[in-house]
Amino acid sequence: MAGRGKHRRPRTNPLTRGIVAVGTGGAALTLPLLGATHASAAEPQSAPAAQSVKQAAQPAKSLTYTVVKGDSLARIADKYDVSGGWKQLYKDNRAAVGANPKLIHPGLKLQVKTTKSVAPKKTATQSSAPAKPVAKPAGGVAQATQASAKTYANNLDGWIRESLDIMAQHGIPGSYDGIYRNIMRESSGNPQAINNWDSNAAAGTPSKGLLQVIDPTFAAYHVPGTSFDPYDPVANITAACNYAADRYGSIDNVNGPY
């Protein structure tokens, strides 16, 4: 009779019988008994292979970054993938930044440790021929050494040397010893130093920076090519030496408050 097989269990395929249910309770995990020759495709990556991936990471490189308007330590750290974030960036540059990590000024130079590939910048002054030194004029003006083609350490020594090169290009007299001596008297080498107690401060124009220059003097004696931020170490030194040259003949002739 044709209707007799209507509810009969259908005959299973041999492949279907190759599935076994393993588990307890209501949940079951079906495991295929065939296809074992493909098991190697699911094997996890071996430990040596994983280690080779880690070894491919590039070591941190150090570069000098000049702060621009709108920058923050967090933004710079994120841009260059600084390990440790803005806190590590601040720790590496505390001497330049000062006590307040939120207070960074355009023109401030920071040492940034990055794992990103940074292509070197080409400048018009870079060539295979050696740079020709500028003759030293009379009056003790430092010899120009083409500051744009040089790099300087982001510390007091580097700031003074960069200032001397800029001063030489503009005919401003002064020596390393004269600048260093006055900096140590005026600010002890702290580019964020500010005087909030003397007569200038009482008049609303406190002395600022390495050589303690008030804003009107800084503006009047600012040297082109340097930052307009009076806290910028190089701009502060160069403007102060320009002022000292006009009033005393040279920063070397300054031995006290000026």
Image (cartoon, helix red, strand yellow):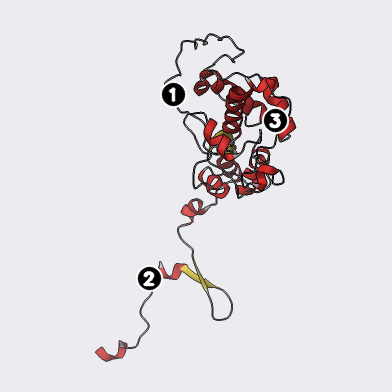
Which amino acid lies under the numbered mark 1 shown in the image of this protein? Thr
Q: Say if 123 sits above or below 30 in the image.
A: above
Q: For label 3, count other residues whose C-alpha is less than 10 Å away and answer few (under 14), some (14-19) or many (20+).
A: many
| N-terminal label among 1 and 2 | 2
Could you tell me how far apart the alpha carbons at marks 1 and 2 are, in whole angstroms? 76 Å
Q: Left of 119 or right of it: where is 249? A: right
Q: Nearer the viewer, residue 5 or 256?
A: 256
- Outermost residue on the left side: it is 2
At numbered mark 3, what does the secondary structure look like: helix, strand or loop?
Answer: helix
Residue to which mark 2 is pinned: 13
Q: Residue 197, image x and y in percent?
A: 72, 46
Q: Quadrant of residue 216?
A: top right
| N-terminal label among 2 and 3 | 2
Could you tell me how far apart the alpha carbons at marks 2 and 3 are, in whole angstroms? 93 Å
Residue to which mark 1 is pinned: 123
Quarter of the image for the C terminus: give it. Answer: top right
Q: Residue 20, image x and y in percent?
A: 50, 70
Q: Residue 133, image x and y in percent?
A: 52, 10
Residue to which mark 3 is pinned: 183
- The answer to the question of whether label 3 and label 1 lie on touching residues, with beta carbons closer than 8 A, is no
Q: For label 2, count other residues whose C-alpha is less than 10 Å away and answer few (under 14), some (14-19) or many (20+).
A: few
Residue drawn at the location 56% of the way across and 45% of the way down: 77
Which amino acid lies under the numbered mark 2 shown in the image of this protein? Asn
Front of the two marks 1 and 2: 1
Residue drawn at the location 66% of the way across and 45% of the way down: 201
Q: Quadrant of residue 56?
A: top right
Which amino acid lies under the numbered mark 3 shown in the image of this protein? Ile
Q: Left of 14 or right of it: where is 182? A: right
At numbered mark 2, what does the secondary structure look like: helix, strand or loop?
Answer: loop
Could you tell me how far apart the alpha carbons at marks 3 and 1 are, in whole angstroms? 32 Å
